[in-house]
Amino acid sequence: MAEETKFKLTYATMFDPPEELHTRYEAAVAEKRANLGAEYGMIINGEDIFAAEKFEDPSPIDTDVVLGIFQKGGAEHATAALDAARQAAEGWGNTPWEARIALVRKAAEIMDQRIFELGAVISLEAGKNRFEALADAAETSDLMRYACDQLEENNGFAYKMNQDPLVGYTATNYSVLKPYGVWLVISPFNFPAALAGGPVGAALVAGNTVVLKPATDTPWTARLLAECYREAGFPPGVMNFVTGPGRTLGQALIDSPEVDGITFTGSYDVGMNIYRTFSQFKYPRPTILEMGGKNPVIVSNSADLERATQGIVRSAFGNQGQKCSAASRVFIEREVYAELADKLVAATKEIKVGDPTTRGITMGPVINQSAYNDFKSYAEELSQSGNILAGGKVRLDDAMGQGYFCEPTIVGDLPIEHRLWKHEMFVPIVTLHPVDNLDEAMQLANDVDYGLTAGFFGCDEEIDWFFKNIRAGVTYANRPQGATTGAWPGYQPFGGWKGSGSSGKNAGGHHYLQLYMHEQIHTTIE
């Protein structure tokens, strides 16, 4: 966007952008649509690498449209990428931190310059509307810059410690954080830019070399990010990009002893399998896992129901419910349950489903056939056990029959013991439940294996109670911009408790970058 605008794109501000955002985004979409179907290599040791086998990247908007051809990397490509990263690790790790952050900031600047290209590709590949796609791209460079700022503000994390009380000697002690070596980043489809570029940037800033493997549903976005890193001038082998199936390429990366640390974002089941597999080594290695959520919203009878409606709908149905932070369970005090349910249904019926690159469309398709089938299966199960108040069907009208379009769905009267109260569906479905009091709501909110995000709507006197008692890593009160979603680096660091995360530290916050380094003490006696 032009330098003269004061508009800063975030998930909280994206609802009222300047006209320039629309015109530049639409131009980028038109350019990309005119040049679909190209083949893209992996990037290993700075070079484009092609495999014998390929795979197509179809658009979830129209599955007949092939966005690009990508490489089906295998174990040999995992080995090559890790070897390149290992060979570059010592040199990169010993590069002065000032030089490292200069290169990462340069890559972030290139991403900013290409933000509309990135946004267009994210929409075509992941099905996000223009606002969410551009915010995903913008968050990527902000995460990278935040990591740079943290290293700079802490002087490279070198601290002078206390002096030993030695008679006849002078002791100097320093605590220094140093990189682990080779870092693996496995990124998801739902935030194909931010949850790839953010961890990659942090690992690079810390002095690690990186191998990035994106989800097979979104390789094009990750390839664009890899190009930005290469264009910024990182030495060969410092940042490597590979594509291929998780069961072969991904598993070969996870199993390799050449990996010194890993960041994974995805499902609980896959994340826990990685956690267990990665521990089967001769010594512990750092594992940063973000594994989803089953995020509650509590609504008090003192709440502003208009604000609650806006916040819940945005969080439940943003990115088609395919956010680990999506609002999926809403507990409402009985006195206002019927009124709020009516407001939520009315607002949900106003959501426009369709091609997400079209202006005015706020909800695109789910990512693939598996998610589409999941939606249909869940909707059928919920119709038998509960009451579908809005949605519940796939969309086959007009051109939507060519893609994976589902209606935003609200369910009431679902027995609280039903399995879907605790199962992460990752599709646009939210369940409502009346409660007799806030303590009952809190008990239900916390009674789940996840603890990622949570929201509350009520009076000022109740907010402190909510923050003290909720068991989640990112919590919001009275937020119409998103009841449980919309975290931004430097504003709301993002991470979860319990089954939602392994580190206890949130990305885009004060304590995250240090996860990519280990401590060494330097003692000198004179």
Image: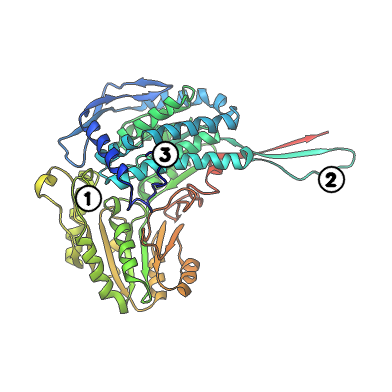
For the N terminus, the image quarter is top left
Cα separation, mark 3 vs mark 1, equals 26 Å
For the C terminus, the image quarter is top right
Residue at image mark 2:
165
Q: Nearer the viewer, mark 3 or mark 2?
A: 3
Marks 1,2: beta carbons within 8 A: no
Pick the residue in front: 59 or 51.
59
From the viewer's perspective, is 517 left or right of 373? right
| Location of residue 117 in the rendering, given as x and y in whole percent from the top left corner | 31, 34
Residue 251 seen anywhere in this rendered image of the structure: yes
Q: Earlier in the sequence, mark 3 or mark 1?
A: 3
Looking at the rendered structure, the kind of residue marked 2 is: Pro
Pick the residue in front: 164 or 353.
353
Marks 3,1: beta carbons within 8 A: no
The dot on residue 360 is 1
Residue at image mark 3:
3
**Looking at the image, which residue sits at the far left?**
398
Pick the residue in front: 344 or 389.
344
| Location of residue 186 in the rendering, given as x and y in whole percent from the top left corner | 39, 38
- Residue drawn at (32%, 27%) of the image: 73
Q: Earlier in the sequence, mark 1 or mark 2?
A: 2
Looking at the rendered structure, the secondary structure element under dot 3 is loop
Looking at the rendered structure, the secondary structure element under dot 1 is loop
